[in-house]
Image (cartoon, rainbow, N blue to C red):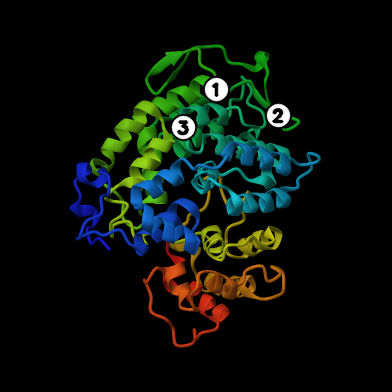
Amino acid sequence: MATLTQQQFDPASAWARYEPDARRPWNLALAGHLYRRAAFGASWGQLQRALRDGPQRTVDALLRPVGDVAAFNRQYDELETPANDENSSNDLRAWWLQRMIRTPHPLQETMTLFWHGHFGVNAAKVNSARAVQQHLQLLRRHALGSFREMLAGVVKDAAVFLTLDAKASRKAFPDEHLARWFLEAFTVGPGRFSDRDVREVARAFSGCFVLQNQLRFIERERDAGTKRILGQEGIFTGEDVARILAEQPATAQTIVRKVYRWLISETAEPDERLLSPLVESFAKNHDVLQLAETMLRSNLFFSAAAYLQRMKSPVEFALGIVKGLEETVSTPPLAEALVRLGQNLLHPPTAKGWLGGQNWINHATLAGRHNLAAALLKSDGAFGGKLNPAAVASKHGTDARLFLDLFLQGDAEPSGDSGTDARRAAYAAITMPEFQLA
């Protein structure tokens, strides 16, 4: 492992491509690190291929996979479409987990999960599975695309308006709560706008109504007067708000900092100088794929400043086990288990998503993670014995010691009770403290 900390990087070297050498070799630990952050985890075969291909070719495959991603997404979009518009978010939640497990483009799903937390749409408030599904499709479509285009879609997204209790924005009573969320949580961030900006953005959204779970624009309720938003003046609408907010340098700072926490580290706040090259580039092109690519290829990503510097969310914890053991499982009970661990997909606690970090772990949720690990590995029960550690060990021509390398890549020593039984050895590995970290 490289030993450089964030403070020892200047921006140029931090974001330069990592090239292995004698001091910083490409190894199993770094391959596992890359797959944890970009793909929810890896199988043994994927890790071995990564070792052969090297870091840059492995990142290539994660950014631009060879499989027909569009065909896969079309198939799952159709499968996930609710038969009616009743609130069946439990089904949608289970389908999304299946999609995360099976996708040929796991980075797209990890970034969809990131944006789900950023915009914080809550299915209980939306009360329409179809509207929630359309929101997820919007996030997925732009998850590695243009943030500007994503925001242009969000300002017309009924699920976002319903989550923010913004069903009607009238000319006489523009919705300042909606406006403040767009400014503070989604784009420029706190302290970077005035109360007047809030009022003017609210006026720009006047005429927006959610009717039958669709966002409608009612012209007679539109405030057609001139607005002044963040120094720009015009007869603005909600679409203009999206453009203005996307163009703000402060928005680029907000998004780059949040993606940094997602892909690099949540334990140390990066200084502005370190992030400045990424912020400058993102402010010009709003390209999420380019931002993610710069981070995932970088010296900083493959250093100690990033290694194990995130706490796995419950989704990441569970999918790391499933992906490692090369099978899928029944996802309705998995979704329910994740609720008990603190991550109810499609139901974030606020429109700011989940707090994350150390908030994922307490005595109850840690015990819950151990219980879920045991349930996933049982030969019967809710998950039907689909995950078979013995078969995985046999497939790869090794013994139960495989699981320390598969799940921990040498970051922990075998415990005294792991033995040679494959299920016991796998359980010992996935309940170690190190496996809780990404």
Give the x, y percent position of residue 161. 62, 34
* Amino acid of disc 2: Gln
| Image quadrant where residue 224 sits | top right
Numbered disc 3: secondary structure? helix
Indicate which disc, 3 or 2, sits on the residue closer to the N terminus.
3
42 relative to 171, above or below: below
Relative to 341, is 150 above or below? above
Q: Position of residue 74 (x, y in %)?
A: 66, 37
Q: Which mark is residue 420?
A: none
Residue wearing tag 1: 238
User: What kind of residue is marked 3?
Assistant: Phe
x, y percentage for residue 67? 55, 42
- Nearer the observer, 161 or 139: 139
The answer to whether residue 386 is above or below residue 248 is below
Q: In which quarter of the image is the C terminus?
A: bottom left
Disc on res. 147:
3
Badge 1 element:
helix
Q: Residue at x 63, y 41 (%)?
A: 72
Of the image marks 1 and 3, the number of the one nearer the N terminus: 3
Name the residue carrying label 2.
214
Sooner in the amino-acid sequence: mark 1 or mark 2:
2
Look at 69% across and 63% down and name the residue there: 333
In the rendered view, does 82 fall on the left or right side of 208? Answer: right
Q: Select label 1 or label 3 by which is in front.
A: 3
Q: Between residues 393 and 8, which one lies in front from this camera angle?
A: 393
